[in-house]
Amino acid sequence: QVQLVESGGGVVQPGGSLRLSCAISGNLSPFDIMGWYRQPPEKQREMVARITHSNGTVYGEFVKGRFTISQDNAKTTVALQMNNLKPEDTAVYYCQRARGGDLHYVDWGQGTQVTVSR
């Protein structure tokens, strides 16, 4: 069974950077897709970035080149480097595994809070 544990959240000023990590325990399938999602206060959860086994990536429109998703070769960690953070990036960030790339069958981490504020 795959378990996901996020870390790296915190409070940062606008324009600052944070690096989130998702520690993956268990074996992934080559067809699994890993991703980062976020849920701002009183809003729905939205996709931030996703990465395939072969490092293909896709990003939410709001990212606009500010964030980068990556994974280590052993597929034990998925990271999200976030630069030029804005107050509207404030949210709980979640790591997701889509089994076989199917968004109907997903696993979630517990989430990590990111707050962008002066």
Image (spheres, grey):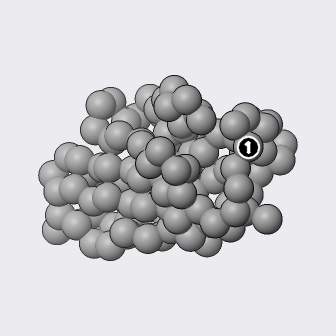
Residue placed at 15% from the left, 52% from the top? 15
Drawn side of residue 35 relative to residue 72, left or right: right
Which residue occupies the foreground of this view, 19 or 112?
A: 19
Quadrant containing the C terminus is bottom left
Decide which of 3, 68 is in the foreground and name it.
3
Residue 51 at x, y percent in the picture = 54, 36
Q: In this view, does 63 lie to the left or right of 117?
A: right
Q: Whole-percent x and y of residue 117?
A: 24, 66
Amino acid under label 1?
Ser
Residue at (49%, 57%) from the top-left corner? 77
Name above or below for residue 101 compared with residue 18: above
Residue 25 x/y as whole percent: 64, 66
SS for dot 1: loop
Q: Can residue 16 be spotted in the picture?
A: yes
Rendered view: 2 above or below 73: below
Is 81 displayed left or right of 102 in the figure? left
Q: Mark 1 points at which residue?
A: 29
| Residue occupying the point 30% across, 49% down | 82
Q: Residue most toward the right?
A: 104
Q: Which class describes the residues within 10 Å of circle 1: few (<14), some (14-19), or many (20+)?
A: few
Question: What residue lies at 55% left-to-right and 29% top-to-bottom?
Answer: 54
Q: Can residue 42 be seen in this view?
A: no
* Location of residue 5 in the rendering, given as x and y in whole percent from the top left corner: 56, 70
Q: Quadrant of the N terminus?
A: bottom right
Corner quadrant of residue 108: bottom right
Check the image and report above or below for 13 versus 85. below
- The foreground one among 6 and 75 is 75
- Vertical arrangement, residue 47 with respect to residue 24, above or below: above
